[in-house]
Image (spheres, rainbow, N blue to C red):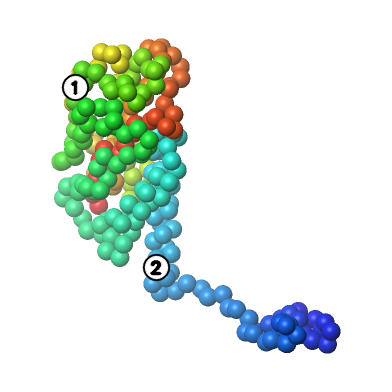
Amino acid sequence: MAKVKNGKLHGRIGNTIHRVFRGQEIVQSYPRSLKPRGQTLTENNLFGECSKMNASIYRLIKDFALRNFDYSFSWEIMALLKRNFFQKQSNTNSNRADWKKIEEATCLAINKGVLLEDVLFELPDSTLANGKLRLFFPAHTKIEHALLMKDVVCTEYSFTVIHYDFYLKLAEISHVINSGRIYTSRGFPEQVYEIELSSEEREIKDGLIIVCFGLRFFASSISYGYLNSKEINPTAILGMWYKA
């Protein structure tokens, strides 16, 4: 509502705003709020769907990485999902006979302080074909100590498989493989793990598969806490595949 001050109007009358600037009365149109429509509305909807997908996946990655990483990684994953699934021509629009790998997600560091290659002489690998996931951890006679904490006695590696269901819009952990604690000075033997995505317990025929890998450090073979921190927490996404 407009008011009269010193003989001049101040405030709103109908669709106009009255104000005084340097002694002169100025009348302006009242700004209108515009509802998004057309392409803008489509982009807003896509952004909302992408945000929901990212939130569902990110919470599981966050737990896997022990919450020890820069939270800007959330935006990195968000951008990756948007590029691959929420453009005008979405990858999920066409049916695929087999799983398609997203190359830009291969060995994508979750924590960028100390990388896996800073600790391991050869990186683990993952492949997915014909519904079978193959996880490979190469033999290591020793683990690089230069960047690790001096109190590290045992090391453990872990693979975690995350499945996102496009229809249910839900992310869940489908498989977990832990090496168990091994004395760091003894190194690790070579290991190959094969996982059938569809089994009696769980059937995964399509969706998005994310394989995470990480190292955890301990001061003892039976200690309760881990020594990982935000500065030293080698974790990465080894691979990402989709099938719609």
Above or below, comparing residue 87 to residue 11 in the picture: above
Q: Which residue is mark 1?
A: 139
Q: Looking at the picture, tell me which residue is in the foreground, 70 or 191.
A: 70
Q: Earlier in the sequence, mark 2 or mark 1?
A: 2
**Dot 2 crowding, Cα within 10 Å, few <14, some 14–19, many 20+:** few
Residue under the image location 39 percent in, 18 percent down: 150
Residue 165: x and y in percent read 33, 46
Residue under the image location 31 percent in, 34 percent down: 115
Q: Looking at the picture, tell me which residue is in the foreground, 36 or 146.
A: 146
Q: Which element type, helix, strand or loop, lies under badge 2?
A: helix
Residue 149: x and y in percent read 39, 21
Residue 233, visible in the rendered structure: yes
Residue 226: x and y in percent read 43, 22
Task: Name which quarter of the figure residue 184 lies in.
Answer: top left
Q: Looking at the picture, tell me which residue is in the foreground, 116 or 55.
A: 116
Q: Which element type, helix, strand or loop, lies under badge 1?
A: loop
Task: Name which quarter of the figure residue 138 lies in.
Answer: top left
**Dot 1 crowding, Cα within 10 Å, few <14, some 14–19, many 20+:** some
Residue under the image location 27 percent in, 21 percent down: 143
Q: How many marks?
A: 2
The dot on residue 97 is: none
Residue under the image location 22 percent in, 31 percent down: 123
Above or below, comparing residue 244 to residue 130 in the picture: below
Residue 178, visible in the rendered structure: no
Q: CA distance from mark 2 to mark 1?
A: 50 Å
- Name which residue type carries label 2: Thr
- Name which residue type carries label 1: Ala
Q: Which residue is mark 2?
A: 42
Q: Nearer the viewer, mark 2 or mark 1?
A: 1
Residue 95: x and y in percent read 21, 55
The N terminus - image quarter: bottom right
